[in-house]
Image (cartoon, rainbow, N blue to C red):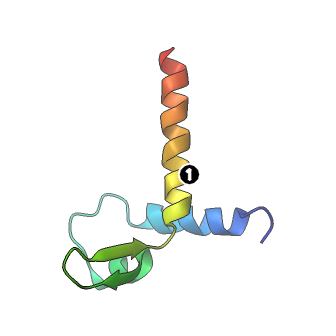
């Protein structure tokens, strides 16, 4: 994996495969969720969470630049 390109490609492929979903299925859950901790105030850990955060931050930064 050079410069995270393989991870980025896998991230984009996985998310685009499930775009516009209206219900959770086993396939989607396995494809996008890393693990779920069940307790009061539990936690869901998504696969590709870091990659998703970087992409959304990049999009928001570019929106702000275009607005100026």
- Residue beneath the point at 32% across and 84% down: 37
Quadrant location of residue 20? bottom left
Assign a secondary structure to mark 1. helix
From this viewpoint, which residue is outermost toward the top?
68
Q: State the image coordinates of residue 55 (x, y, percent, origin top left).
A: 54, 49
Q: Residues within 10 Å of mark 1 (few under 14, many from 20)?
A: few
How many numbered marks, from 0 up?
1
Above or below residue 28? Residue 13 is above
40 left or right, relative to 5 = left
Quadrant location of residue 8? bottom right
Q: Quadrant of the N terminus?
A: bottom right
62 left or right, relative to 31 = right
- Residue beneath the point at 50% across and 54% down: 53
From this viewpoint, which residue is outermost toward the right?
2
- Residue beneath the point at 48% across and 28% down: 63
Q: State the image coordinates of residue 14 (x, y, percent, origin top left).
A: 49, 69
Residue 10 versus residue 39: which sits nearer the camera?
A: 39
Above or below residue 55? Residue 15 is below
Q: State the image coordinates of residue 57 (x, y, percent, origin top left).
A: 51, 43
Which residue, given by chain and number where applicable, does mark 1 sit on? 54
- Residue beneath the point at 48% across and 73% down: 47
Quadrant location of residue 28? bottom left
Above or below residue 16? Residue 32 is below
Residue 50 versus residue 4: which sits nearer the camera?
A: 50
């Amino acid at each position: 994996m050079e410069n995270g390109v393989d991870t980025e490609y896998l991230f984009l492929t996985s998310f685009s495969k499930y775009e516009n979903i209206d219900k959770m299925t086993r396939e989607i859950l396995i494809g996008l969720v890393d693990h779920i901790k069940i307790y009061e105030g539990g936690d869901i850990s998504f696969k590709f969470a870091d990659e998703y955060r970087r992409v959304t931050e990049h999009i928001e930064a570019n929106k702000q630049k275009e607005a100026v």
